[in-house]
Amino acid sequence: MAAAVAMAARGCGGVWRRARQRGAGQPGPGPGPFPRGQRAVACNARGGAVPAGKSGLVPWVPVVGLEIHAQISSNSKLFSGSQVQFAAPPNSLVSFFDASLPGTLPVLNRRCVEAAVMTGLALNCSINKKSLFDRKHYFYADLPAGYQITQQRVPIAVNGSLSYSLCIDNKMSQMVTKTVRIKQIQLEQDSGKSLHDDTRSQTLVDLNRAGVGLMEVVMEPDMCCGEEAAAAVRELQLILQTLGSSQAVMAEGQLRVDANVSVHHPGEPYGVRTEVKNINSIRFLAKAIDYEIQRQIEELENGGTILNETRAFDSKLGCTVPMRDKEGKQDYRFMPEPNLPPLILYDAKSLPANMNHQQVINIDWIHERLPDLPSVKRKKLVEQYGILPEHSFTLLNEDGLAEFFESVVKQTQMKPKKVIGWILKDLLSYLKQHSLTVKESPVSSFLLADLLNLLEKKEISSPAAKQVFMELWKGEGKTPLEIVKEQKLGLLQDQKELEQICQAVIDGQENEVMAIKAGNQKVLNKLIGLVQKKTEGRSNPVLVKQLLEKKLSE
Amino acid sequence: MRAVLLGPWLRAGTGPRPHPATPHRAPHRALRAAPTAPNTACDSQQRLPAAGRDLPALKKVSVEVLDHLEQLALVDFRDSEGVERLQKAIQFADQLHEVNTDGVEPMDSVLEDRCLYLREDDVTEGNCTKELLENAREKVEEYFVAPPGNIPLPKLEERETFLQGSK
């Protein structure tokens, strides 16, 4: 995950050019159409000045818009009482309505409406107090009714924004905040799942997912490259998970992203866009978008045209390919859903007096109970602990890491600014190496705090602490103190013994002593090193230096 | 003959909405309820006169529109009589445009004043796999079986059923 975010977080700044040099010896389908170093990207799609191409090629401005479907985290489906659950026996979570048997009617789930309102508020949208449901018609085996109930004309939330952070250059030292506008959020039904059996030329249909509530978040085309899109989606994912309105795990299909990509020259109208589907992770999202941008640029520079088509991302080859089933523009024949009256939401002012509480959704009530969003949490961490914004970004990016950090800080005297180093450099890198989540860490916050206390009390040196940490990682249940005792890593506490050793070293190194007394201070380090050797690394170098200097000046 | 869904959404090919120009038109003439049998409105024998005037002009539906409709809704107009029936149905529905709706909010549901009932988020249904699969002609281990993807209708020229009985 950190790799994906690190990649996502590197910002753009420059101009897209046809970066790949055509010629002999072109490598086969590799990791992407261009090596990272050659690429520079124009990220001023909203009309900002784009620098002219160095090589004389006219610059391209890529435009990226996203359509995101987030599965609502609820017990039952949007319009029926069947259970929502991942991986259940086929067609076991299907009611008569979900199978669209005649005579069944939709009944709206209150929890789904609340989830959509929460999400709308978190994304700074205006919540429509009156929204309508429509039918979107198309034929497909996993859509038994032949239409999907959605909110095309008047959705539940409109005109919001999402702010996300990117790092310029690879160093994670400078973060820049960007914003993408949210056009609307609408409630809609999910379709069932089709399993294609090509050998027997048939499709197997499982309707467990049919009718599950979705929030479709439509973003305006304010982004200009894969990294921006990935960062925006990552932030949305964190927001949804914080709100609890969706678990937003892409791998389980709870968060699906389709990208609309086009390129044009600055000052000219937008180019023809293609839709890219079948993107299964945030990392692939960035790859797919960047590939598609590059493909379109090459196609246009070679005199070709871009078709308004739907393409699928092939993660193995790292490229997009045209999808067969969707040809030309679909005519969905939208019509109002005749079985559902308008959805009316209330706020503190318009709250009706005599209505049953259960039938009333109060936007203000929900607003008051929104949890702290990731951006707010990050600010609080920076203010409370004095860590850098980049640090809080990484803390929130790993599930459970911020809580771990705060827990360690509570249990140790070490300053948070020092603790953060241990969390981000030592703990996190170990976790990544072993592909573990914070929850699976063999080193608990208690053990780490214990270790840091030893370090803080100067009972061990910093290198020794790293050694203890490595030992703790084995998860054998020993405490830091036990390991220190076992491996004799404790710093020598006896001042007299240390002084004796220092004296012995001075006595044995006449030449070096003369050089120091003559003014060459660097030789002192050699003496410190010798003391360290004699004490098997158990001396505090600062203290040793002081002692040696004192003795040499006598 | 399958019933065809009509309405302003099927305006393709029939041009923009006619502008109510003449002042003698009654502003809110209540539309007579459609006859009970769905086909009689299209039947050439029966015509419901509009306040003493003729029905609006009969508009021809082009072959491209018919093809498009067949693809979208999988209806089969079959022959020229079917197409004529369609055209008469559109003509009948065009009477809606004669009503002056200036300044009137469109109504898209007779339920607009009703309360939309909100259900509690409890699991109350499902677990009826066996019953549901009884409806399936073919099944494989509790999955419904469908053909592999949508089989698109053949192009207009190659279609055998398109307007079979006509010229």
Image: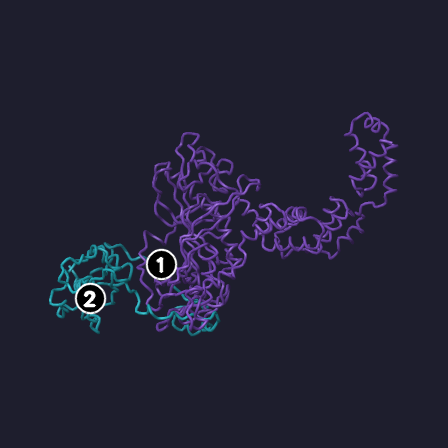
Residue A511 vertical position relative to residue A36 in the rendered view, above or below? above
Residue A348 position within the rendered picture, expressed as x and y whole percent measured from the top left: 45, 64
Q: Which residue sits at x=58%, y=55%?
A: A399
Q: Chain of mark 2?
A: B
Mark 2 and mark 1 on one chain: no
The CA distance from mark 2 to mark 1 is 30 Å
Residue depth check, mark 2 versus mark 1: number of the one nearer the observer: 2
The answer to which image quadrant residue B42 occupies is bottom left
Image colour for chain B is cyan
Numbered label attached to residue B28: 2
Helix, strand or loop for disc 1: loop
Front-most of residues A340 and B146: A340
Residue B85 position within the rendered picture, expressed as x and y whole percent measured from the top left: 18, 65
Q: Quadrant of the C terminus of chain A?
A: top right
* Any part of residue A210 in sight: no
Question: Which residue carries the number 1 mark?
Answer: A152
Tell me if A548 is positioned left or right of A436 in this view.
right
Callout 2 amino acid: His
Front-most of residues A259 and A481: A481
Image colour for chain A is purple
Q: Chain of mark 1?
A: A
The answer to which image quadrant residue A336 occupies is bottom left
Residue A341 position within the rendered picture, expressed as x and y whole percent measured from the top left: 35, 68
